[in-house]
Amino acid sequence: MKLNISSIPKVDKVLSFPAVASLLERHPKPIVLTAVRSVLETLRMDSREGILLKAIDERHLCGLIAQELENVVAPSLRPVVNGTGVVIHTNLGRSLLAESACRQILEVAQRYSNLEMEMATGERGERYSHVEALLCELTGAEAALVVNNNAAAVLLALSGLAAGKEVIVSRGELVEIGGSFRIPDVMRLSGGILKEVGTTNRTHLKDYQAAISQETALLLKVHTSNFSVVGFTAEVSVDQLVRCGTEAKIPVMADIGSGSLLDLSRHGITGETPVQEYLKAGVDVITCSGDKMLGGPQAGIILGKRYIVSKLKKEQLLRALRIDKLTLAALEATLRLYRDEREAVAEIPTLRMLTMQPAALKAKASSCLRQIRSRIPSSVKLKVVAGNSQVGGGSLPLLNLPTFLIAIEADNWPPQRIDAAFRQCKTPVLGRINKGQYLLDLRTLQHADIPALIDAMSIFT
């Protein structure tokens, strides 16, 4: 029957209910009031819109208020189960941190630290020193600087090196990536003057050479991120561009995006040039992300010639873009793992997930099924199917990683309904739908996700 709006109790009446009074003993009154008003307003709106509702008794109403209160006090930013198979999932926080990085964050967060203090002299130090030597050791760069993300790194480099001057870029590299980060817009904001060369699909060395003038400050090469141009194409290699810059006495900058420190080709991951190769080729300044292929926290890493990095350290803009102590702690701990490649692949979650082989994934699927099956009704069918995972984060968009997935089927539960219900769980579960099946990719499921996944299965009971 339709609920009569006049039968919905007033706020004062609801606050007098014993169950709500109990909530007031455990939570601040303003928060309880917010929950009460939200529930009552929802009931009124449903009534006005003609939605058929059951009669609301005191017990049911208090239950709704308790649920709403739980939503109000719960943190907005919370863990989710990533069963999508996208390893570096931008919407889900990109890279997971290694355990050692998490421990280092906690250690630095709970105590004072030597963030900007030189212990040997007692004088003020430089926060970037905590990772600069490590970055130089691992990459071969002369100097390094870290800011809060790669967009900031690009902005700082362009502002410091080319404000009021021309920057030559191939038209095929004028990318836009997630969050509307556009190279032309960043260029404009930095004060650099964009000078496009070539065409969308073909750019030649002669295009750069013809465009160089007295006003040229920088030759810029940009990683094409999450798209690829295929077919009738041509691009200028890093080696060619460096030779061009050397001849014209103009520095070359490369925004390489993902920031891979390892050659992962022996694990079947090809197409992502390690940072070290750009530096060996003679690129003067490189920018990349810390939370993509590198597998660390969000950060923008600048590597290159000492005279360039020293200049950027003096830019006033740097203070607005600087990295905080917790990110520095996580980045330092992550970089230390790279001193041993085997340890890095084993301990850094992003690398571990990317390099997992199909046999290990199939075994993981079988183990996961054994733990879940005993907790679900017989009407729910689970099976293991083969498929592909994605790297994500704008890295290697054409690379498919062979994987195994759990397919979930249930009577009267189309995949879209499963997807919506899983996303509303206390710990949301995210999978993907393909060919009429709801799927959870074992590549991105973590061992710690299993209890939450089992709890999510209660939607079927």
Image (cartoon, rainbow, N blue to C red):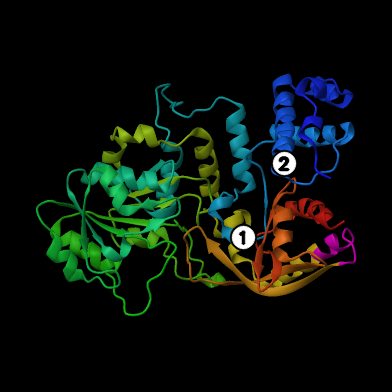
Residue position marked by numbered label 2 in the rendering: 46
Which residue is pictured at 27% across the width and 67% down the height? 239
Q: Is residue 269 magenta?
A: no
Q: Residues within 10 Å of mark 2 (few under 14, many from 20)?
A: some
Magenta-tinted stretch: 369-379
Asked whether the viewer can see residue 313, the reply is yes
Which residue is pictured at 53% across the width and 27% down the height? 113
Q: Nearer the viewer, residue 63 or 339?
A: 63
Residue position marked by numbered label 1 in the rendering: 352
Q: Quadrant of the C terminus?
A: bottom right
Q: Position of residue 304 (x, y in %)?
A: 32, 50
Asked whether the viewer can see residue 94, the reply is no
Q: Position of residue 143 (x, y in %)?
A: 34, 45
Label whose residue precedes the other's in the sequence (2 or 1): 2
Answer above or below: position of 157 versus 5: below
Which residue is pictured at 49% across the width and 28% down the height? 114
Give SS at disc 1.
helix
Q: Position of residue 197 (x, y in %)?
A: 21, 64
Q: Is residue 370 magenta?
A: yes
| Three-letter residue code for mark 1 | Arg
| Three-letter residue code for mark 2 | Asp
Apparent side of residue 361 relative to residue 163 in the rendered image (left or right): right
Residue at the farthest left position: 214
How many numbered discs?
A: 2
The image quarter in which residue 208 lies: bottom left
